Image (cartoon, coloured by chain):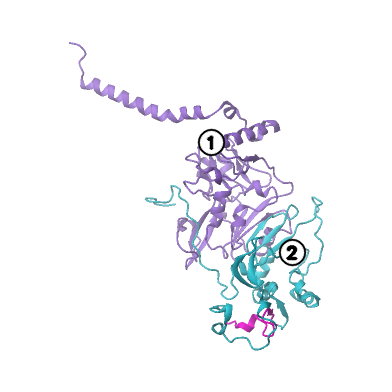
């Protein structure tokens, strides 16, 4: 599984601009895909109590950020995707004006994301990439940077563990943690969280036929 | 002459036989209890009075009983509170969608009775603009989040000042050093005072012996947390202490798809829970009762 590592509990979170500088300066853009979100190059901090190094927090990377899912799975269980660069090989030209003009494997795309158009997020010159508001190119795998341009409060909460699902350890001195990516829950094109059917309600004696109150 | 059957005598005999059978019926559970209880269990000491060797014997016995009664091969441990750790929990009501994934995860993690679909978490469906928990419904069964509603999961608030502990006549429930209120299921007499005393409806009573298929039993168990409970005792949320005392996140938090739940060490100023307490407008349920919960709620701001 493609993951990226970030070290949580760093003393400070460097501002977004610093991360961008690091990304822009990164010689191999493809390798930058696995660069750390917070440009946090600190070594895992020694824990005062146990003396053990802190474990990593890794953000699960959805397969759709690496290409178009084919529906098949590799023997490892990882979804097989067609990489964006397979079709989008640096062709220039204007992006479609609206979602209904999108063709090929993306036909039927629906966009309900405020007043955004394709060019709000996608780079017109490199369709396998994203573009920030200031014109900086961005790998698809760095999409959270792009989300954070507008959704700063959500990103702030995410960075402090108060938004977005996670699993693993609360105590990073004892074990690692994995975190969801923004688009695990929010389809970038239709970001509203979908309504779901809940798990079954309890069947205790306070409910069911004849229960007058709880 | 012989013995004449008078109406008085007939009624007397009838009453006596009815009373006798009612008495036999009433004491039948006692007979069953005597049959089901072995000497070791009957003479077992309180958890906090057990020696190390005595506790080890109890854990092995309970494992054997689970294997016998449920056909499941389980391991029961006794993880102790971590030093310099006080657990705290916070829940973001703006993000919770009421999917009950937390309650479902609790159900499986903690070996709850399948028949009642029991869980330590009740998710209340509340009308936006209100905070009256009495009006919350826990039995909703439609797509969520429903328009005009928000969802408030309620579980044990691990109070600093727990009324449930105060009322226990046999001290079968107490507050551990890391803030978790626990129950010694083998010491509990099932009087349910604690259930009545809890203002959060957080305690559950085992009316029946839990029914769980062998292949669904979570074998990772602890004495004070998720081992299969006997019939007739009270149980409650223990912050998944068999996980959290080893540094892992509680099952309900891992199951939450939206990240509404924040768990951590209140004594660690770098922890997520401390950030929430410092930066969000948190509140506790029924603050006026003075229970001083360790479970906080907040809305996004």
Number of the label disc, if any, that sits on residue A5: 2
- Quarter residue B42 falls in: top right
Q: Is residue B274 above or below residue B201?
A: below
- Chain B colour as displayed: purple
- Counting other residues with Cα less than 10 Å from the Cα at mark 2, is it few (<14), some (14-19), or many (20 or more)? some
Residue B301 in view here: no
The residue nearer to you, when weighing B272 against B106, is B106
Give the camera-side residue of B290 and A63.
A63
**Residue bounds of the magenta highlight:** A115-133
Residue in the picture at 47% in, 51% down:
A202
Q: Which chain is cyan?
A: A
Query: Which residue is denoted by mark 1 in the rendering?
Result: B69
Q: Residues within 10 Å of mark 1 (few under 14, many from 20)?
A: few
Q: Residue A185 at what x, y percent from top left? A: 59, 67
Residue pictured at 68% horizontal, 60% vertical: A178
Q: Tell me, yes or no, whether the highlighted magenta stretch contains residue B217.
A: no
User: Which SS class for mark 2?
Assistant: strand
* Residue at 70 percent of width and 31 percent of height: B53
Magenta residue check for A125: yes
x and y percent of residue A39 in the render?
78, 70
Residue displayed at 20% across by 11% down: B2
């Amino acid at each position: 599984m493609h993951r990226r590592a970030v070290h949580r509990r760093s003393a400070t979170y460097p501002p977004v601009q610093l991360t961008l500088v690091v990304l822009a300066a990164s010689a191999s853009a493809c390798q930058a895909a696995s660069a750390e979100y917070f440009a946090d190059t600190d070594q895992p901090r020694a824990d005062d109590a146990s003396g053990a190094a802190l474990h990593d927090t890794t953000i699960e990377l959805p397969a759709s950020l690496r290409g178009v899912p084919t529906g098949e799975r590799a023997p490892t269980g990882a979804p097989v995707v067609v990489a964006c660069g397979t079709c989008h090989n640096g062709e220039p030209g204007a992006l479609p004006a609206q979602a209904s003009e999108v063709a090929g494997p993306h036909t039927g795309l629906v966009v309900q994301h405020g007043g955004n158009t394709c060019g709000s997020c996608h780079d017109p010159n490199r369709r396998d990439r994203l573009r920030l508001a200031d014109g900086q190119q961005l790998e698809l795998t760095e999409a959270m940077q792009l989300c954070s341009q507008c959704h700063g409060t959500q990103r702030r909460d995410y960075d402090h563990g108060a938004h977005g699902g996670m699993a693993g350890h609360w105590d990073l001195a004892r074990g690692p943690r994995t975190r969801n990516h923004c688009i695990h829950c929010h389809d970038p094109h239709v970001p509203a969280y979908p309504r779901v059917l809940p798990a079954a309600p309890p069947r205790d004696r306070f409910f069911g036929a004849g229960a007058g109150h709880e | 002459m012989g013995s004449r059957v008078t109406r008085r005598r007939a009624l007397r005999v009838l009453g006596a036989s009815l009373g006798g059978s009612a008495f036999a019926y009433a004491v039948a559970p006692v007979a069953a209890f005597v049959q089901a209880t072995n000497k070791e269990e009957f003479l077992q000491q309180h958890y906090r009075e057990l020696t190390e060797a005595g506790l080890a014997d109890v854990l092995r016995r309970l494992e054997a009983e689970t294997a016998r009664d449920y056909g499941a091969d389980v391991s029961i441990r006794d993880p102790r509170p971590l030093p310099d750790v006080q657990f705290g929990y916070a829940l973001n009501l703006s993000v919770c969608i009421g999917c009950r994934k937390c309650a479902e995860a609790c159900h499986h993690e903690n070996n709850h009775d399948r028949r009642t679909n029991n869980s330590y978490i009740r998710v209340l469906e509340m009308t936006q603009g209100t905070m009256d928990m009495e009006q919350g419904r826990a039995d909703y069964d439609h797509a969520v989040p429903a328009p005009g509603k928000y969802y408030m999961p309620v579980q044990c608030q691990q109070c600093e000042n727990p009324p449930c502990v105060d009322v226990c006549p046999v001290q079968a429930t107490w507050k551990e050093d890391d803030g978790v209120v626990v129950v010694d299921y083998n010491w509990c007499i099932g009087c349910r005072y604690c259930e009545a005393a809890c203002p959060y409806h957080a305690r559950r009573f085992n009316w029946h012996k839990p029914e769980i298929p062998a292949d669904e039993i979570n074998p990772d168990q602890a004495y004070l947390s998720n081992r299969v409970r006997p019939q007739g005792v009270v149980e409650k949320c223990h912050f998944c202490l068999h996980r959290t005392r080893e540094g892992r996140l509680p099952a309900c938090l891992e199951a939450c798809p939206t990240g509404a739940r924040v768990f951590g060490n209140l004594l660690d100023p770098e922890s997520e829970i401390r950030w929430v307490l410092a930066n969000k407008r948190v509140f506790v349920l029924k603050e006026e009762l003075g229970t001083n919960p360790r479970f906080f709620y907040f809305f996004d701001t």
